Image: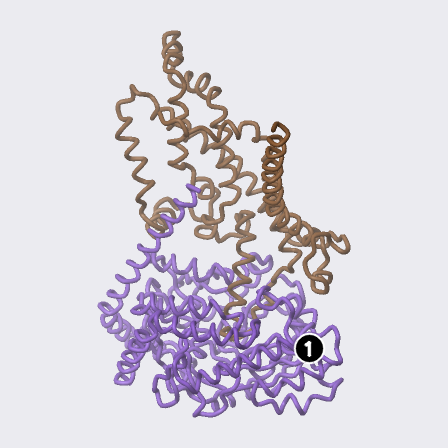
Chain colours: A brown, B purple
Amino acid sequence: MLALNQKKFKLSLALIHLFFILLCIIFIIPMISLLSISFSSESDIIDFGYRLIPRSFSIESYNFVFNNPKQIISSYRLTLFVTLAGTFLSMFIMLMCAYALSRKKFILRNVLSLFIFFTMIFNGGLVSSYILVTQYLRLRNTLWILILWGLVNVWYVFVLRTFIQGISESIIESAFIDGASEFKIFASLILPLSKPSIATIGLFMLLQYWNEWMPALLYITKPHLFPLQYLLQRTLQNLEEILRNMDKMPGNAIDYKVPSESVRMAMAVVAAGPMLMVMPFFQKYFVRGMTIGAVKG
Amino acid sequence: MTTRAKKMITLLLAFFVLAAAALSGCGKATGTGDDDAEGTTTKATQKQEAQKEELKPVKLSWYYIGNEAEENAPEVFEKANEMISEKINATVTFHRFSFGDYPKKMQLSIAAQEEMDLMFTADWSLNYAEIVSKGALLELESLIDGYAPGTKSLIPDKIWNGTKVAGKIYGVPNYQVSFRQPALIFKKELVDKHGLKDKIFAVQKMEDLTPIFETIKANEDDIIPTLVPPLWQKWDARTRDEYLEIFIGLPCGVNYDLEIIDTNNDEYFIAKDEADYKLAREWNEKGFFHKDVGLVKDFTPEMKAGKFFVLNDVYKPGIESDMKTRYGYDVYAVPMGMPVLSTGSITATLTGISRTSKNPERAMMLIEQMNTSKELYNLIVFGMEDKQYKKTGDNRIELIPESGYTGYAWMMGCQFNAYFLPGQEDDVWEETKRLNAEAFEAPTLGFVFDRNNVKTEVANINAVSKENEEIKKYGILEVDEYMDKLEESRRKINEAGLEAFKKELQSQLDVWKSSR
């Protein structure tokens, strides 16, 4: 009886393992093939197609990516800066906002909540924000637009608020009695206690800034302000547009530099790489962070 | 997930706003069009006085497609501005956006009513008919009469007619090859090796290619015979009676007598579709297509590596040299079908003047300069001598690779000004002009279909056609299996609203016919 149970148990376990192993493989294979293509030479791809292990190892495409145009290096620097500065600024502002909204004593709490929440459901649309940014704020072709675009995510503000509400009110009260100012309470108590939520939301913001290319498409025309993802996006969009309209174009456009397959993959690796490295550092907070927002305050 | 949801909402809202803007723009265009036309005519009559006076310096902006990241562009533009300011006392800011970005960025700028002067527009990129209906472009007739007499006489009337929307000109064609004719591009080396030259030039219909491909397949292991699938609409029509103009890729066309032909339900055309498929299937079974066809979207690397025996392109005189620079090997170009002068072929490259322009007269003068001043045109297209190109003859140049500047000859004015490139015959422009004059004039010349009223139907029909597109082109399924699919897709297309589309097309054609 016992043996049977054990066997049954093992079988289901094996099945579960098998399922997750297969799932992992499904996720990992594209990554490996991406890497492999980026390390293949162009002629190998033409002759033998895509392979999981490159036939001959070549770093030709990486040489092309890093040597030839200075563009990619400058874009890299820019994206790195925007990502770090943007995430920092955005976390700071969202946390302050969330803290204020979490305090029951704050009179404007409900009004402000509604005000913020409203933007989540309705917004002015692309054209009006475009007019605002270009004609009133004059942020076109500036670093600021890359940072300010998506600085505050309302959803995250509410998640953070919920988390902060979970911190016992009495801690704040006792600090208040000890003579701490509001900002002091926020900086020395709330911030350290919110670490898991900061790590989780911070990671989301980091990813968001790293992957964002919309603001660049809309507001950036100067090549030295092209973020990395926009550079990639543009390459693919151009390729698509040219292929789609080949029959209609009156003349050559294909001499517009279309990077080869392996160069495109190398660019993708270069663009995704740093985020893959960052991931493990957040891992330990991440699991705890996943449950935040689950308890409604 | 939530950011995505939010983005979706943003996009949706943006779409509504754009749609609203488009609608309001539409109303405006019809409302203020006449006032503006009057305004410009009075301006034109004042022109003599204006020209007597010294021209005040103005700034112009010109938007077109290009690579904004080129390092030597500022140098070229500086030189161009020296020339332009000398001639018309204007300084031009050149704004170049890449192929993918151009329509998106410009749509926004237009919706936001930004101040712009000149812009590139076409039927394939920043859609000409669409931005005209939004009221983004100025009506040009009087400006052309007043400030661009050279351009006006340079371009034949029938080509001007192709640019008219509701009887008015909103864009100046960048004059060049104005007809469209598909061409098969053969790899010369292989044609000569197997003595196929006579055979390829004798090809009339796509089925004539089968024996040629058989020879190639049997003798050349590494070569894929064709990238080109059979498609009767594109390749096989050789006479006026066979002519059918297809609108926005729908299975429905207009013949020479301006009758609407429903190719989805007409027995004759169904038989043609079936014959096409049988041929595609035969080619597929014999291994004439690339093995990954239908999966891989972009074959550029293979094309450049010379893996294909046949490619396709748009025919024009001197195309052989274009192909050589593009793919790196010699080719024979065999024109197929008919050379057709249509609204689409003419509006493929236009320069328009924005309604928000503060100096439309000066903008028109710039267009005139691009069409008549050989020096300026060649500077902007090819760059500077000894930096971007070397002169090899009186009127002949060779481009220096990696020179940090490129322009598109077909986007910027009259191409007959251009220097000859290696491989182009001295008479290439004469030949082009001759063919332009001889080309078959589409009965619908000047007619543009406006899909706004049947947007849903068009989208639905397109979605159905897309489902089987690759299978159909490359004969991926067994014939029997496909015939069932075809049957079903035909029914679905009818259900998706083909009838509504036909009605709309008919009523638009009627309106257009009566306005002619």
Tell me if residue A173 can be seen: yes
Q: What percent of the width, then of the height, locates residue B488?
A: 43, 72
Query: Would you say A215 lies left or right of A113 here?
Result: right
Q: For the point 44% across and 92% down, which residue is it?
A: B240
Q: Provide the residue designation for mark 1.
A: B392
Q: Quadrant of the C terminus of chain A?
A: top left
View extreme (front): residue: A1
Query: Would you say B360 lies left or right of A213 here?
Result: left
Q: What percent of the width, then of the height, locates residue A97?
A: 37, 28
| Amino acid identity at mark 1 | Thr
Q: What percent of the width, then of the height, locates residue B63?
A: 45, 63
Work out whether residue B391 or residue B167 is closer to the camera in this orientation and state it: B167
Q: For the point 46% across and 17% down, which residue is it?
A: A188
Q: For the point 43% across and 52% down, which residue is it?
A: A218
Vertical arrangement, residue B458 with respect to residue B268, above or below: above
Query: Would you say A113 lies left or right of B95 here?
Result: left
Q: What percent of the width, then of the height, locates residue A14?
A: 62, 38
Q: Secondary structure at mark 1?
A: loop
